[in-house]
Image (tube, rainbow, N blue to C red):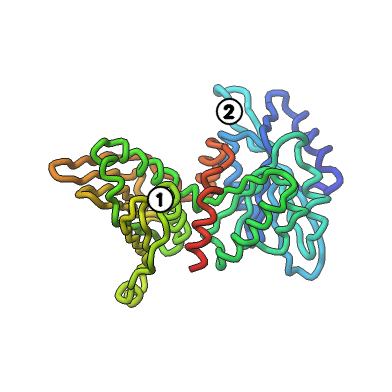
Amino acid sequence: MEVPIGSIDKELRKLWEQDDARTNASLMNFAVYSEAPGALEKNSRAIQTLTAEHACRALLIGIDRDAPEASIRAWITAHCHLSHGKKSVCCEQISFALTGKATGRLRNTVFAHLASDLPLIFWWQGELSPIFEDRLYSLVDRFVFDSSEWADPAGSFGKLVDAISGATRDLVVQDLAWTRSFQFRVSVAALFDDPLVLAALPEIDSVRIVHHPDHRGSALQMLAWLAVQGQWRDGMELDLAVARKSGNKEGFSFESQGGKAISAELVSDPESAPLGLVELSGGGVTVAVSREAGATHLMRTIEAAGHVVEAPGPVDPDDPAGLIGEQLARGGKNSLFQKILPRFRQFLER
């Protein structure tokens, strides 16, 4: 229901007093920010799903920065889920619709309703706008975004790195483009548990990654992970005249610790899943992790002379809310993403 800005806390207390059977649960503050029209309704549905597994106080923020008049409206919602078929466990949601210049109002009005002493997870949707500045991220514990939504990822990552280095607290950043590759990375690592594959690791000389055009960032992050974890040095630029002509391929070259040349090819395919294939070859062995668009599982494959193994594996969600849920369940400081970030930015800026 819509409530006056000055009466939000009072109306929330009245909401809980109406029914003793409800339990108010909250382990974190979870804010969702969007400048897209209709985002409040869409994000409210996402919160309804997320609160089934992750108790929180949710703050939904929708802003129309181009509106000529400044205004702010608020609504409160309780998302309730049955516990053992009886008592309902509920999470609070406060939705804010702002118009006009939002400087100061976002922090002073919206963030004044954070549940005290709980961490703040902030999910930023869309391009980084001027609202993204130190007065915002100085309050945030985990900053979640999806770089696949950015028109200029190289520039936006530059702003993000500046924010990390200038933050007065440890700011954990989480790119949903990176989260999309989690099960691929787990599967690639699992394939090298095979002794035959592990023995061929120093002989790897070819990498092929297929991705959807909207998810080039996930493919580049996957390549950065392979290069960093394998300690590959950058090699000479590949001659990709034919690949450039086709318009859907790009190439990279590396040198292994043992001095072996490694060529890598990224292929953009509109029929692919966000990540469709990660294939590594060398020493007579080929390992691959693949997924068809919309498939509910990955396929792990090992091919060598007289040795072929295929096994299914779990897949990451395609929708952003599902990815958020997976990341909240795992938690952590996301140190591996920080580790590959410099190499990934090098690839972006080529």
Disc assigned to residue 79: none
Number of disc labels: 2
Disc 2 marks a residue whose amino acid type is Leu
Q: Amino acid at mark 1?
A: Leu
At x 78%, y 65%, the residue is 100
Q: Is residue 271 visible?
A: no
Determine whether the residue tagged by mark 2 lies in a helix, strand or loop.
strand
Classify 240 as above or below 323. below
Secondary element under disc 1, as helix, strand or loop, is helix
264 or 136, nearer to the observer: 264
Q: Position of residue 279 (x, y in %)?
A: 30, 52
| Front residue of this view, candidates 234 and 138 | 234
Q: Residue furthest front?
A: 259
- Expressed as whole percent of the image width and height from the top left, the position of residue 342 reads 54, 56
Q: Nearer the viewer, mark 2 or mark 1?
A: 1
Counting from the top left corner in percent of width and height, residue 230 is at 40, 48
The residue sitting at 44% across, 58% down in the picture is: 220
Residue occupying the point 67% across, 30% down: 25
Mark 1 neighbour class, 10 Å CA radius: few under 14, some 14 to 19, many 20 or more: some
Residue 337 in view in this figure: yes
Question: Is 267 on the left or on the right of 282, as rendered?
Answer: right
At label 2, counting other C-alpha atoms closer than 10 Å, the crowd grade (few under 14, some 14-19, many 20 or more) is few
Of label 2 and label 1, which has the lower sequence position?
A: 2
Residue denoted by label 1? 226
The residue tagged 2 is 82
